[in-house]
Image: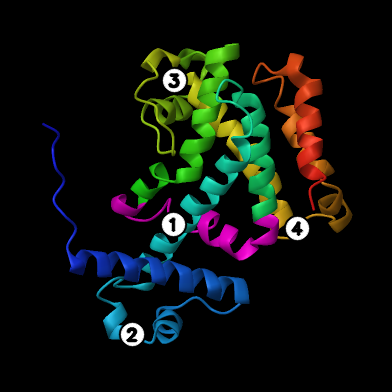
Amino acid sequence: MAHLRAPVTRRERQREATYDEIVTVSADLLAEGADLSLRAVAARMGMTAPALYRYVSNYQELVDLVAFELDKAATAAWAQAASRFPEEDPAARLVVACARFRQWALTKPREFALIFANPIAEADTERRDLLTLATSGHYFTDLMWRIWELYQFPYPALDDLDPVIRDAVLDPLIPAKSDHIPPEDRGLLWIYMRAWSALYGVVTLESTGHCDPRVIESGQLFRATILDWLEPLGLQHERGRLTAILDEELARP
């Protein structure tokens, strides 16, 4: 007999609905260019600030909640766009997802900043754990794992890594499923980290406007960054096909 889940109570449904509204209102404030604050969210929801504290007790909790949920929603949209290619083609899915990630960052720079410029590294242990939970990180690293399964691109041996990096890949604080990777093969995580830093770097420059606007408009810096990573990921022989997919994405309005 199947295990029956206990029914959700009305109070629990109301609480979840309130969390959803907090995220929606916060996203609206960001889109409008307004300040995101507990007071602003409470006012928009028709609540007092003390009433809102029953759901988020401080500003950082608000940011963490909103960042996680917006990242989750955005990743679902990128994944949906990438799903026009089959699961057996993770390389094409990765190209599409990267392009949609860039487009989202350019059109929603405040959401991007909230999610990806939200300081965590020097925070307490509980908040550092957020580094391992980002939906987007899991999605991108899962795609890279599938690419490795198909193409077996090279990665460094543990003994060839700097001791700090070796410790980082053996006990990673990144949003990636790594338990299935044997310790001796964790050099693969170093490839993950470097590839993400390249993608994140170019998208951050463009989203924050710290780049020649003509280069942003053309998409050529982003395009070159993606194409530069085809060979390290064992995809050089797919260059023509993946370039065509990338150019199609960049041509989207």
Report the residue at 63% width, 47% height from top: 101
* Residue type beneath disc 4: His
Residue named by callout 2: 49
Residue named by callout 3: 186
**Circle 4 Cα neighbour tier, 10 Å, few/some/many (<14 / 14–19 / ≥20):** few
Image position of 161 with respect to 11: above or below: above
Any magenta on residue 99? no
Residue named by callout 1: 69
Residue at mark 4 to residue at mark 3: CA–CA distance = 34 Å
Which of discs 2 and 3 lies nearer the camera? The answer is 2
Report the residue at 39% width, 27% height from top: 178
* Residue type beneath disc 2: Ala
* Residue type beneath disc 3: Arg
Disc sitting over residue 210 in the figure? 4
Give the extent of the magenta segment.
105-127
Indicate which disc, 2 or 1, sits on the residue closer to the N terminus: 2
Which of discs 2 and 4 lies nearer the camera? The answer is 2
Farthest front residue?
Answer: 1
Indicate which disc, 4 or 3, sits on the residue closer to the N terminus: 3
Report the residue at 39% width, 82% height from top: 42
Q: Is residue 253 visible?
A: yes
CB contact under 8 Å: marks 4 and 3: no
- Foreground of the two, 112 or 238: 238
Determine whether the residue tagged by mark 3 lies in a helix, strand or loop. loop
Indicate which disc, 3 or 1, sits on the residue closer to the N terminus: 1
Q: Is residue 160 left or right of residue 18?
A: right
Indicate which disc, 2 or 3, sits on the residue closer to the N terminus: 2
Report the residue at 39% width, 72% height from top: 59
Q: Is residue 231 left or right of residue 167?
A: right
